[in-house]
Each structure stands twice: as structure tokens, then as C-alpha cells.
Image (spheres, rainbow, N blue to C red):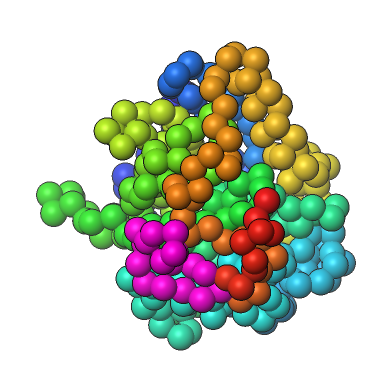
Amino acid sequence: MTEMTGDFNNAPPVMLQNGLYLCDVWHQRLAPKRYAFRHRVSFFCLNLSVSSGSGWLLPPWLLGQNRFALYAFHERDHLGAGAGQLIEALHDAARANGYTPAPDETIFFIGQLTHLGYVFNPVCFFVFCGASPQRPEPLFVLAEVENTFYERKLYPVPPAEADAEADNPTLQARQFKARHPKLFYVSPYADLDDDFVFNLSFLPQGLDIRIDTESRQGEPQLLSRMHGPLKPLTTRALLRHTFALPAMAWQIIALIHFHALRLYMLGLRVRQKTALPQLQQGRIVPYSPKPTFKPTLGATPDEDKIRHSWPDNAIP
């Protein structure tokens, strides 16, 4: 796997802002057969704490919230929330996973937006930041993973513990790490009881994220990494991005199916989604009303952390 470059050890404290991450994304499958790819992918970074996107400072036809625009963030696409409900749902989810946000904390979204009528986020992030507008430093992260059945699942990623022997332990505050049982159908070529290993770094010059998949015995199965700089979000920059990386969400879903076909041709065993329903826990069913959160992460199917009134027979 290609190594990233850059000196991240002596960087000043990070502060998120509205922008575009222009990332290189690597995937390297290690078992049962080796397979790797690399693509250029963009991710929006948006402050969700501003009213109706009014603080994004772009023309309303170009970027909007809960309405039509060339690029649009819709609350309905996340946590099963409706318009005006997402911030409250995120606060509920954070509290259910051991973090109590201050009422005036800033929340940034990092992921894809609806473009040309479509959006798909294999993974996106909700980053809770300090309330100070001058220093919105990351404090806690909720990662939302989405599968091609448009189900979603949240994984909390707390700050990494500071290394007492480090020259500057405060630098650890921008690093977030967690290991969770996946218990979610993400790929037909992966076991549902594997673990996700999250290692997120928010840097002054950009983003460096690793999300690896390991067996319950700790054996690496799949390595993935996204890394890139944060560019200011301006009208000119977004229009230039539209032509440089057109129809990003459509590209992502097409590439997922392309690589899935290649893995099938390599002879990888396919796991059927309906085979092990007991190992698919805590799912957020698509287009559900506002969720209710329970405080346990490792719940049984009847005690899922996130429950919805969407009927079970409507699950794809």
C-alpha cells in the first residue's frame, strides 16, 4: 500500500472550517485474495450548526440544505432524521455512546452531498467541535457507515488517549481511535463479525483517515485509507471541482459495483445478506422517522442502540 507523505507530528492544533477535502482513497484487501485499488475522491466539510446552511456563504442555487441545489445536504439522508431534527438526533446518539455535547457545540459533516439527484456515502463523519467559533477543534466523532441497501450504522470514535511520553501530548487531541464489532452487512465478501478499526486524524493541512477491517482474532482483512488537503469552499472552487470530479456520488456507487464484479470474477465467496440476520445489529433503516437511541453499543437484535418505527418487512 502506498505510504502517505507529510510531517504530521509537529502540526499546530487543527480547526475545522467549511471546505472540500480532495483525497486519495486506497483499499487493499489482504484475504482471502489480495486486491487493491486507488481513486481520487472529494468530500465536503460543512458546519451543520448554521441555520439552513446560511453560513456556507455560497449562492443558494449552488449549495443548499434540505432543498434543491446543485449540491444539497439533506438531513433525511442521515440517522433517519427529518428536516430540522438532525442536530438533536446527533446529540442523542453522542450521549448514548458516552459523550455529552454542550448545547452550543459546533458539528461538522464530512462526506458526500446530493448531486444530480443522488447521494451515497460509504462512510461519512459527524465531528463535534468546541463551541468557540475561533477554535472549532474536534472533540468527538460519529462515523456513519452506509451499505448499498441504503441502511446505515453509527460507530462512535472517541479521542485517542494522549501518550504521556510524547513531546507534546496535546497533539493527540486531534486523533480519534476505536475498535468495534462490525455487525453490519457492508460487503458480500466480508464476514459480519469482523471488527472495524478506526484511526482518524484531523490535521491543519487536511485529513488522514484509516478504517481497517480485522477478524475477531486481530488478523487484517482489508486496509483502507483516505488522505488529502482541505481547500476553501468558494463558488469558483466548487464549480472547478464539479468539472474536475463530475458526479462524484454516481462515480462512487459505480466503482463499488465495478470492484465487486472483479472480486466475484476472482472467485471470492459471496455472503448473502439474509443468511445471518442476528449479526446485523443497530441498523438505521432507510427513510425511517426520527430514531430513538438506547445507550448500549453491543446490543442484541431486540436491544439495538438505534430503533425505528419503520416495519421490519421493509428492510431491503
Whether residue 221 sits left or right of residue 109 in the image: it is left
Q: Quadrant of residue 196?
A: top left
2 within the magenta span: no
Q: 45 or 258, which lies in front?
A: 258
Measured as percent of width and height from the top left, residue 158 is found at 34, 60
At horizontal 72% and vertical 40% (from top left) the residue drawn is 253
297 within the magenta span: yes
Is residue 85 visible from the viewing direction of this image?
yes
Q: Quadrant of residue 262?
A: top right
Is residue 46 visible from the viewing direction of this image?
no
Q: 226 or 152, which lies in front?
A: 152
Measured as percent of width and height from the top left, residue 232 is found at 64, 57
At horizontal 70% and vertical 39% (from top left) the residue drawn is 252
**What stretch of residues is rendered in magenta?**
291-307
Q: 240 or 74, which lies in front?
A: 74
At horizontal 68% and vertical 51% (from top left) the residue drawn is 316
Residue that sits furthest to the left in the current view: 165
Measured as percent of width and height from the top left, residue 176 is found at 36, 54
Image height of 82 relative to 273, above or below = below
At horizontal 65% and vertical 66% (from top left) the residue drawn is 311
